[in-house]
Image: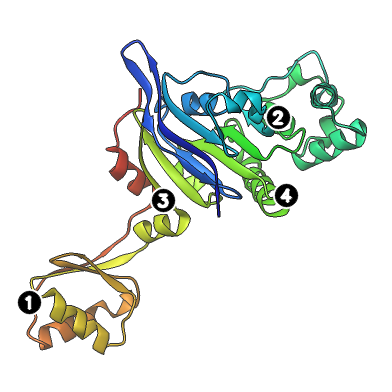
Amino acid sequence: MEYLLTTNALTKQYGRLKACNAVDMHLRQGEIYGFIGKNGSGKTTFMKMICGLSRPTSGTITLFGCTGKELQRQNVFARIGALIEVPGIYGSMTAKDNLKMKCLACGVSKIDKYCEELLELVSLTKFADKHAGGFSLGMRQRLGIAMALVGEPELLVLDEPTNGLDPQGIADMRRILRQLCEEKGMTILISSHILEELSKVATCYGILNEGQLLMELTHAELMDKCSDRLCITTEQIERAAAVLGEMGIRNFRTADNRTLHVFERHEEVCEINRRLVMADIPVAGIVLSQTSVEEFFFSVTGGGNGR
């Protein structure tokens, strides 16, 4: 699977402040990349740079195989649909007219049918002829996403798209993103400061803190770090592992030279402890650890406040 987007030491500096500091991102085609970071961590700044809305101070962007001046010459940014910060809509126009205007700018044919399909996708059909100026924040977000989808972009960039949405709206958003990815093969970069929410839809993640990308990981890797585990602490870790194997326990791994993590049969903790003691293995500790996605995020970022 090839990378659709990579950045190398991408940096944006305002005076002494590095809003993005040497960010190396890797986004594969067909992925939903959850870009997670506290408010003020640099997510929006990064998104503006990869969409061509802000010039990097240093570093490079490689997008659809193009980099440097080729990004402009090949009109690469036209292949991106984006909703960054606030939706760019006209309040004096109806939802449908806002979409029609975007369709005309993008050269879309059969505009009426196309707009109806987009409005249905974002659950705004019954508000098609209502002026956008009277929309709630959540409705404006929905319309902004519909406008970002005009022209069937290959990469969809969404900056905090669930802002203002109620629980049903957030669930609808997850459905829409999965549908776009699975049925249309669209690659999606979506930012949020709530990892718990992103974990329900993203296939991979990048964690940004104070302008720096701390790590990238897949959904499976995230779930592994956040799954329940039985933590066994002993000085005789190899012998303890052998005992687990004799019990038919296979899903475990060595965390360090004194700790084993067991990911199955947690209800048998008493029997596991008894078997270790019977094998004359000193057990310094045996405890069930439960780490939520949110706790993992705070452990990585330090749990402080963003700028």
**Comparing marks 3 and 2, which lies closer to the viewer?**
3
Q: Position of residue 69 (x, y in %)?
A: 56, 23
Q: Amino acid at mark 2?
A: Met
Please give the residue where the numbered disc 2 appears in the rendered image.
139
Where disc 1 sits, the SS reads: loop
The 10 Å Cα crowd at callout 2, few under 14, some 14 to 19, many 20 or more, is many
Q: Amino acid at mark 4?
A: Lys
Asked if the residues shown at circle 3 and circle 2 are in contact, with their CB atoms under 8 angstroms apart, the answer is no
Examine the rendered structure and indicate whether residue 230 appears above or below residue 303: below
* Total number of numbered discs in the rendering: 4
User: CA–CA distance between discs 4 and 2?
Assistant: 24 Å
Asked if the residues shown at circle 1 and circle 2 are in contact, with their CB atoms under 8 angstroms apart, the answer is no
Identify the mark nearer the N-term, 1 or 3: 3
User: CA–CA distance between discs 3 and 2?
Assistant: 32 Å
User: CA–CA distance between discs 1 and 3?
Assistant: 35 Å
Identify the mark nearer the N-term, 4 or 2: 2
Examine the rendered structure and indicate whether residue 123 appears above or below residue 59: below
Please give the residue where the numbered disc 3 appears in the rendered image.
217
Please give the residue where the numbered disc 1 appears in the rendered image.
282
Asked if the residues shown at circle 1 and circle 3 are in contact, with their CB atoms under 8 angstroms apart, the answer is no
Q: Position of residue 134 (x, y in %)?
A: 75, 19
